[in-house]
Amino acid sequence: VLGFAIAFQVGVMVLFNLVGKGVEFFPSIEPEVGQLNIHARGDLSVLERDALVREVEQRVVGMPEFVSVYARSGVRLGNNTAEDIIGRIQLQFVEWNRRRPADAIMEDVRKRTSDLAGITVEPEVQESGITSGKPVQLELTAADGALMSKAVDDIRAGMAKLGGFVDITDNRPLPGIDWRIVVNRQEAARYGTDISSIGSAIQLVTNGVKLGAYRPDNVDDEVDIRVRFPDTLRNLSQLDRLTVNTLKGNVPVSNFVAREPAQRVGSIERTSGVRVLKIAAGVAKNLSEDDKIKELQAWVSGGGVDPAVTVRFRGQQEDQAESERFLTNAFGIAIFLIAIVLIIQFNSFFQTLLILTAVAFSTVGVFLSLLITNQPFGVVMCGIGVISLAGIIVSNNIVLIDTFNRLRAKGITATEAVLLTCAQRLRPVFLTSITAVLGLLPMAFSLNVDLVNRKLEIGGPSTQWWSQLSIAIAGGLTFATVLTLVLTPCMLVMGEVWSQRTFLRRRSALFS
């Protein structure tokens, strides 16, 4: 029986790795809101950006799945956004039971906007759990900034080669030129001018020189009063014709000012004082996010990126690893405390180990139930379920083993004591397991009872949170009940047989 249990556990684990849905951080919940990120490149004016966002808005505003559509356009619409986002459209879905799934709706939006020239529409849905943003997030650091830019290109090429990654973005500055004004301070001083005067002259070509402010009668905020050249004179060539007023009269700034082109620099992000570049990506539908991240990690570790560049996986992967460590430590501490109590209670290391073994074997039921229901192993929800499951299993085994010890103390043989124990404790073990499993079945099948409107709902967002947790506990407890009534009695008899054989060997060795 023990050999069959071990073989069955190994088989279920292998089967889950081969055909299971993998591992996920938090369960996927049907969202209430969504978002469209509109990407476009080029030196676009405010009006041009707004016109492009309006085109996308017109494609989705008539869809019946949306209660409201709110569009914004501009520059840098929030933190941790790509440089080429020119607008965002916030979408609020109708009730979940009166529409298609959010993934299907967003895929329809992607198809509706795929023919728009010059822009890319990236749909996003509300994330469940504590992690925000895309599931795949990488952070690159290096001593040489040029290496980071090349590493971003290498990783994007690697993602395309591996396949399964969608909506890949990074925070590198957009291609373009910034003109740097280099002032020869010594030459400027000879002409009797300084940096401040030169800066004011250059502002006449750009944003203008601020002279003051006033508050109109119909507004609350002040309005700047600025002076600058007319539109026809605000260009690059005008910079070479600027003059500044000095003690020697008007002097052209070209005598001590030079224009140098440089690559455009957007916002610079730093972590712990070190500049970083970030890459974010989603994972295609019906693919495991955890598997794709591990695949990408293996590709990076295998030499896909220059060793001088440090690549850190952030976002969901970082939070998932932290949660795994916490739950593993919590489970280990719980098992340790349970072991201490059991040793004090039974004064037997073998029976304590027997109970803890039953806890380990119960995880087979968790993975088997996830296979049957075609659910992934949720790090948070299933992890909490396994910890909760341990308490129930320990309780059932304590009831069984305590009765066995009492019967053995009366002089009954091990085999008879096990049979009497199973007969006497069958009802308490069954009642504990059946009531717990039946109580969890509604949540396991995502069943919600609406008492106010007198109707049953299946698959509601409120039940999706607890489906994995209830499946893990119900499946593990069902399998553990069989272990408690079959494997535990066999192990008790086996322990008694081994103990008697050891005692006989020692006695024969002593008298011989």
Image: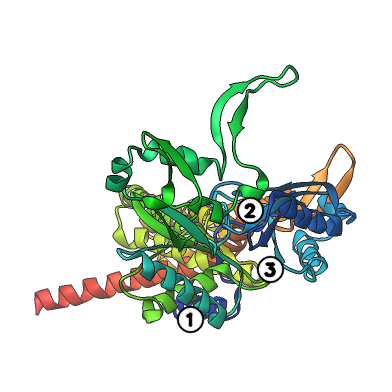
* Quadrant of the rendering where the C terminus is positioned: bottom left
Q: Amino acid at mark 3?
A: Thr
In three-dimensional space, the C-alpha distance between marks 1 and 3, rounded to whole angstroms, equals 22 Å
- Categorize mark 2 by other alpha carbons within 10 Å: few (<14), some (14-19), many (20+): some
Tag in front: 3 or 2: 2
Q: Amino acid at mark 2?
A: Glu
Q: Is residue 34 visible?
A: no
Indicate the secondary structure of the residue bearing disc 1: helix
Task: Tell me the tag on residue 7.
Answer: 1
Task: Tell me the tag on residue 140.
Answer: none
Task: Tell me the tag on residue 373.
Answer: 3
Count of residue discs: 3
- Is mark 3 in CB contact (under 8 Å) with mark 2? no
Q: Is residue 229 visible?
A: yes
Q: Give whichever of 89, 214 is nearer the camera.
A: 214
Position of residue 482 relative to residue 226, above or below, is: below
Q: Give whichever of 243, 352 is nearer the camera.
A: 243
Q: Amino acid at mark 1?
A: Ala
Question: Could you say where residue 254 lies in the image, as x and y percent from the top left?
Answer: 42, 52
